[in-house]
Image: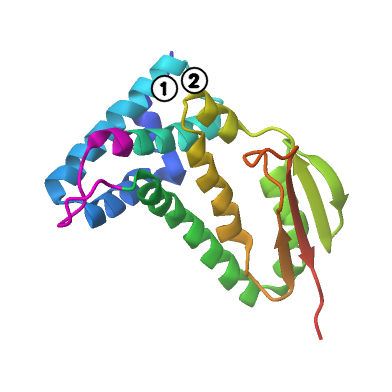
Amino acid sequence: MKANSIELLKDAYGGIFEENVKTILNKHFDSDSAEKLWNQIVEKYSELFQKLNISEEDEDAVYYILPSVAVYRVLEESGASEKGDGHHIDALSIFREIYFIDGQRGHDYLVNRFREDEAFLKGFPQDFLRTVGEGKCEVIFDTPEYTEFHVKSCRFLELTKELNYPEICSVFCELDTLMYTNMHPKLSYNRDKTLYAGDDCCNFSMRYVEKE
């Protein structure tokens, strides 16, 4: 039996999708408008899930991509105005705020963990490869001090293109930069090519450098 899309939505963004969305909506809109927008997002997610016949096994789509598209599409189509100014909303900027909540938390967690655990810091390049690139990349280098891998296909880009909202994929790319840049003086992150920008791959690397 196909799962209830509303039940799946509860687990989106690691289970805090609703909290994140409502936090930012209430920042930009009055309470009635924010609640109305949230209900529309739930409806839009359900509509997209059923229309595309997404498999529950497609976790990126179920828990990240479709919820994100639902937020962006509702904001784009709502015609709502932000508090007090009456101007048309910038849907992409508001979506970015929502999506970056978890990214900032993740970045801060790693920064604090590196301060407390030197072994984790030294092993992070390989941890980075395993967690970010595992199963979907071409491994170029894989050592404790340096890893590099190339991602040749991106479900985020494929599905957002299919839904005619490829621009939100730029926010997914920005999140990598937010998460992994300036984490620790001994770690250097790089990704200067992306599929979104039209390159042949997303080229990720992470280097640990022992400093004096």
- Name the secondary structure under disc 2: loop
Residue pictured at 17% horizontal, 51% vertical = 86
Q: Name the main secondary structure of what is drawn in magenta.
A: loop
Q: Is residue 34 magenta?
A: no
Span highlighted in magenta in the image: 74-89
The amino acid at mark 2 is Ile
- Camera-nearest residue between 143 and 27: 27
Residue pictured at 39% horizontal, 51% vertical = 93
**Is the residue under label 2 in contact with that under label 1 (CB below 8 Å)?**
yes
Q: Check the picture and name the quadrant holding the N terminus.
A: top left
- Name the secondary structure under disc 1: helix
19 up-or-down from 52: above or below: below
In the picture provided, is 83 more to the left or to the right than 23? Answer: left
Asked if residue 4 can be seen in this view, the reply is: no
Residue 73 sits in which quadrant? Answer: top left
- Image position, residue 206 (x, y; %): 75, 59
Q: Check the picture and name the quadrant holding the C terminus.
A: bottom right
- Image position, residue 83 (x, y; %): 17, 55
Residue 79 sits in which quadrant? Answer: top left
- Camera-nearest residue between 125 and 40: 40
In the picture provided, is 199 more to the left or to the right than 33? Answer: right
127 up-or-down from 14: above or below: below
Residue on which disc 1 sits: 49
Residue pictured at 48% horizontal, 35% vertical = 65
Residue on which disc 2 sits: 54
- Sequence-first disc among 1 and 2: 1
Q: Residue furthest top?
A: 1
In the picture provided, is 139 more to the left or to the right than 21? Answer: right
Q: Is residue 86 magenta?
A: yes
